[in-house]
Amino acid sequence: MDGDGERLDDESVIDLGRLSRSCQDCSLRGLCLPDGLEAADIEMLERVVHQRLPLDRGEELFRAEEEFVNLYVVRSGTIRTTQPTAPGDEQVIGFHLPGELLGLDAISTGRHQCNALALDRTSVCAIPFNQLEQVAVRVPALQQQLLRIISREMVEDHNHLAALGRRSAHERLALFLYSLSERLERSGHGGDQFSLSMSRADIASYLGLALETVSRLMTRLADEGVIAIDRRRLRIVDHGLLAEAAGNPSRRDCAPLRSGRTGSY
Amino acid sequence: MDGDGERLDDESVIDLGRLSRSCQDCSLRGLCLPDGLEAADIEMLERVVHQRLPLDRGEELFRAEEEFVNLYVVRSGTIRTTQPTAPGDEQVIGFHLPGELLGLDAISTGRHQCNALALDRTSVCAIPFNQLEQVAVRVPALQQQLLRIISREMVEDHNHLAALGRRSAHERLALFLYSLSERLERSGHGGDQFSLSMSRADIASYLGLALETVSRLMTRLADEGVIAIDRRRLRIVDHGLLAEAAGNPSRRDCAPLRSGRTGSY
DNA sequence: CGTGAGGTTGAAACCACTCAAGAAGGGTGG
DNA sequence: CCACCCTTCTTGAGTGGTTTCAACCTCACG
C-alpha cells in the first residue's frame, strides 16, 4: 500500500549509485521514455524519475485495485503482470523486460488493473504519473513519446490476441520464444541463449494453454532441433526453424529489425 | 482507399448538417474525447474534427500499412478492425461502437496496423492526429483525456486476452454478448434488444472459435432461456443468467480491494 | 537426507474443430 | 411475382488437439 512514495534510504542510493542514475547515461535510453528527446527535455524528465529499491524474486510491485501513483520502467529483471479473473485465479497478461513500461492500463481508472510481480531480482524506475503529465505539458516531445509507447504496447497486445485466437499450441510457444528472444536482444542481452525467468505455469497461462502442454511442446521443440532446453536455461539452436514454427512472424513485426541470420553456428 | 485528406463537398455537409455538427451538442460527448473538457477547450478540439461521408456496409475506412493520418470516432454504426495474420487470413481484433475511438494502434509506427471496415452504414468523425497533438499541447485536459481513452482500450484488450486464455467457448460467447449489450446501452441504444451487425464468422474470429461453434452455442444460449435470437436480431431474455454464463463479469469490474499477502511464489 | 516446488511423461476423456449437407433469407433478373 | 442463386447460418457426425488426472522425476535447500 505504501511504498509508492517511499524515500530511498542512503544505503540503497549508494547501492544503486553504481548503476547509471540519470536517464542520459542509461543503457536503456533508446527503448524508454527519453527516446527522441533533447538533452534539456531529458533533464526535466529525470527530475521526476526515481529508482526503487530492487525487488526480490516473488515480491509484488503493485496489486490490482491499488491506487495508481507511478508508472514503472523495468531496468533489469522481469515483471509479470496478471489480471485477476475468478477469485483465486489469475491470467498472465504480459512479461515486462528491461526498457519496458508498465502500469499504463491504470491511467483510465486511477487504480491498477493488474498485479505486478517480480520474477527475478528486479530493479525499476518509478515515475509519478501526475508529475509526468505536468512535464509532458511543457515537453510536447515527451507527450508524443508516451503516446507512441502506449500505442506500441497496444500493437503487441493485438498480436498476442491474434496468436491466442488462431494459432496452435505449438505455434504459440514458438512465437513466444521467438519474441522473447527478440526483446531480450533489443534490451542488450544476448538473444540466443538466456534463462527463462517465468515458470511453465506462467508461460501456460500467458499462452492460454495447460502447464503440461507447454512442457510437452518444449521438449518437442528441443527434439525438432529448434531449441535446447535444460530446466529454465534455453538456447535457440536454429533461428530459422524457430521463425518457421512461429509462422514467420517477421513480417508482422513493426520494428524493421535486421532479420536474423538463420544460420546455425 | 485514400480519402483521408478529402474535402467534404457541399452536398455532404448539408446532408450531415442534420446531425449535430459540433462536439458540444453531440450525444456521444460524454463517451468521446470532449469528456471532462471545458467548453472553450472543446471549441479548440472541434476546429480540427471533421465528419466523413458515411460509409456503406462493407466499405473500408482504412487498411493496414496505410499511412496514419486520422484517428476516428464512430458516430453511428459499427467498425470492425482486423489484423492480417497469414496472407489471406485475418483475425478480428475488435468491434467499434458509437463513441469509441479507433486508429490508436497506428500512433507507434505512423502506419495503420489493422484493417477497418464498416459492418453497417456507419458515420465517423475524423481527427487529424498531428493537429490533435498540437491542440493537446495547449490543452492539457485533452492530453489527459486521450491517455485515459487509450488506457481504457488497453484494459479492454486485457480483459479480452483473459477471456481467450482461460474461458470456455460458452463463457466467451456469453461474455461477448454481455459486454456488447453494455456498450450499446452506454452509447444510447437499448441494451436489451439489438441487431448484431457482425456475422457469425466475425464473432468466431473475435472469440477464437470456429464459426459453427458460435452458431451452436448461440442456439444453446437460446435454449437455456438466456437470449432469444432470430438470425441477427437478438434479445436478452435474462440478464442474470447471461451474467452468470459470462462468469459474473461485473465483479471483476468494480471488485473491492482485497489486500492480499505478498505473493507466495 | 528428507522435503517440496517445479517439471516431465503417460493414458484417457473431452471440448471444440473439421468436413459435409441442408435450411433460410435476400437479392436479382426474367 | 416467381425462380434462381448466393451468402449466411444451422445441424450432424466423426476426428483430433488439448486438457485432465495421475504418477514420477529432479533439483535446490534446509
Image (tube, coloured by chain):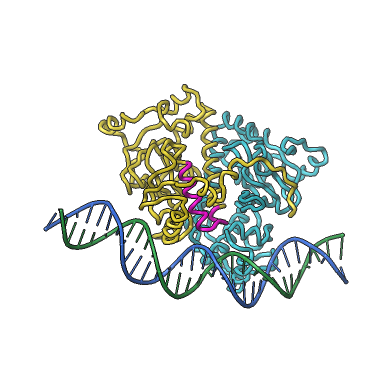
Chain colours: A cyan, B yellow, C blue, D green
Given residues B230 and B215, the one toward you in this image is B230
- The stretch in magenta equals B163-182
Task: Decide whether residue B181 is among the magenta residues.
Answer: yes
The number of numbered badges drawn on the structure is: 0
Q: Is the N terminus of chain A in the top left, top right, bottom left or bottom right quadrant? A: top right
Task: Mark yes or no: residue B72 visible.
Answer: no
Tell me if residue A7 can be seen. Answer: yes
Task: Tell me residue A101's x, y (percent).
Answer: 62, 44
Q: What kind of secondary structure does the magenta stretch mostly adopt?
A: helix
What residue is at 37 percent from the left and 48 percent from the top? B233
The one of B223 and B102 positioned closer to us in this rendering? B223
Q: Is residue B142 left or right of residue B117?
A: right
Q: Position of residue B128 (x, y in %)?
A: 42, 36
Residue at the (43%, 24%) spot, across then down: B43
Residue at 55% x, 35% y: name it.
Answer: A143
Is A116 rendered above or below residue B34? Answer: below
Residue A77 pos. (x, y %): 70, 52
Would you place residue B194 above or below residue A229 in this image?
above
The part of the image, by quadrant, that contains residue A178 is bottom right
Q: Classify residue A32 by image quadrant.
A: top right
Does residue A213 appear left or right of residue B70 in this picture?
right
| x and y percentages locating residue A4 in the rendered image | 72, 37
Residue nearer the viewer, A146 or A83? A83
The C terminus of chain A is located in which quarter?
A: bottom right
Residue lying furthest top: B40
Who's the residue at 36% across and 40% down the image?
A: B4
Check the image and report above or below for A215 versus A137.
Answer: below
Is residue B179 covered in magenta? yes
